[in-house]
Image (tube, rainbow, N blue to C red):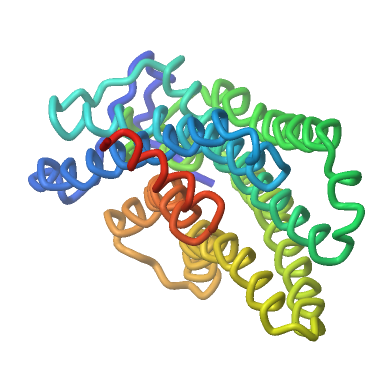
């Protein structure tokens, strides 16, 4: 229950604080944010171009990687430019409709990325457990169905967020202590009973991201069991190398959110600016690192990338 002595009606304009307590360092923070944005754009556009041009890469693993790159590009496009505007031009004002739009799309892309990672785990599971039927099971129709399921789940799970926020009629302040319009950050400055909003926020994380992480761990447990039963060391090494790229991306994607949730469960309260920096890592680091890991660790992709840059150099 959040009570207010001097409440204000829902404002038409909110103020985004950026990183509270570190306002004087916003200029320094803008440098890594900008570099992350540029590297992410270049890396993911390169991945999409190579997969689009190379017909031999039009197979399930790389088509799922292309979907991941599209989501990564969308995620950084709706987060970083707004943050840079705050850091560089002190453009902290955001109208209510733009705020609600951010509130829907930013976590939606995150949930979509989690769903694609689960689909990629399923892809590796089928490739190792049933290689003879791999192309039959994961045909184009199945990939389309998986993509639509990922999209539908994100829309269904996140649509209530802006609707519930719009129904909040009084606030303690119009300053959001965050660098973007996060649902819980807005709810925390609202007046009245917000318990339903907190329950909804938990229900977004647990059934979506928690569900995906559980089945990814289950899939890779079965995958590793199958890999270590392969008699050929060469085949075993090839299978582990292929799965290694995906495991690196999974660790980078889920570790920040797991750390944040466990810290809150254990009662460890981080400084607000540290919490915001970690939350930003959810959305910024995986999109930048995904193409780098796949480009470096996946043999087919590495060969195409090297060939691409060699041709352009010549």
Residue 234 screen position, x and y as percent:
67, 79
- What residue is shown at x 23% (from left), y 32% (from top)? 84
Q: Residue most toward the front?
A: 314
- What residue is shown at x 38% (from left), y 28% (from top)? 7
Q: Is residue 73 above or below residue 201?
A: above
- What residue is shown at x 63% (from left), y 39% (from top)? 112
Q: Is residue 55 above or below residue 256?
A: above
Give the position of the C terminus as an image quadrant: top left
- What residue is shown at x 71% (from left), y 55% (from top)? 212
Q: Total marks drawn?
A: 0
Quadrant housing residue 33 = top left
Q: Nearer the viewer, residue 230 or 70?
A: 230
Quadrant housing residue 242 = bottom right
Q: Is residue 303 left or right of residue 141?
A: left
Q: Is residue 140 above or below residue 200?
A: above
Quadrant housing residue 63 = top right
Residue 16 screen position, x and y as percent:
29, 32
Q: Nearer the viewer, residue 124 or 132?
A: 132
Residue 139 screen position, x and y as percent:
84, 38
Q: Is residue 273 left or right of residue 294?
A: left
Q: Nearer the viewer, residue 130 or 189?
A: 130
């Amino acid at each position: 229950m959040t009570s207010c002595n001097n409440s204000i009606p829902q404002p038409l304009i909110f103020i985004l604080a950026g990183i509270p307590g570190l306002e004087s360092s916003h200029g320094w923070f803008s440098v890594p944010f900008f570099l992350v944005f540029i590297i992410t754009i270049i890396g993911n556009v390169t991945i999409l171009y190579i997969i689009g041009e190379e017909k031999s890469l039009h197979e399930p693993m790389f088509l799922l990687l292309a979907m991941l790159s599209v989501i990564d590009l969308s995620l950084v496009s709706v987060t970083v430019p707004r943050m840079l505007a705050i850091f560089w031009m002190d453009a902290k004002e955001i109208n209510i409709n733009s705020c609600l739009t951010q509130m829907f799309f930013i976590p939606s892309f995150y949930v979509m990325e989690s769903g694609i990672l689960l689909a990629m785990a399923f892809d590796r599971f089928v490739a190792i457990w049933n290689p003879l039927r791999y192309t039959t099971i994961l045909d184009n129709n199945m990939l389309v169905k998986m993509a639509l399921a990922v999209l539908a789940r994100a829309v269904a799970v996140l649509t209530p967020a802006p609707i519930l926020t719009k129904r909040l009629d009084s606030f303690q302040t119009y300053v959001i202590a965050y660098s973007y319009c996060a649902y819980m950050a807005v709810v925390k400055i609202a007046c009245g009973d917000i318990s339903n909003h907190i329950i909804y926020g938990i229900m977004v994380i647990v059934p979506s991201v928690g569900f995906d992480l559980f089945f990814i761990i289950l899939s890779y447990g079965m995958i590793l069991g199958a890999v270590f039963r392969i008699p050929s060391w060469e085949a075993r090494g090839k299978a582990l190398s292929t799965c290694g790229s995906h495991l690196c991306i999974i660790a980078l994607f889920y570790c920040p959110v797991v750390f944040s949730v466990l810290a809150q469960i254990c009662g460890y309260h981080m400084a607000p600016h540290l919490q915001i920096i970690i939350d930003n890592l959810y959305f910024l680091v995986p999109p930048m690192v995904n193409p780098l890991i796949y480009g470096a660790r996946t043999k087919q992709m590495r060969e195409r990338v090297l060939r691409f840059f060699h041709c352009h150099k010549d």
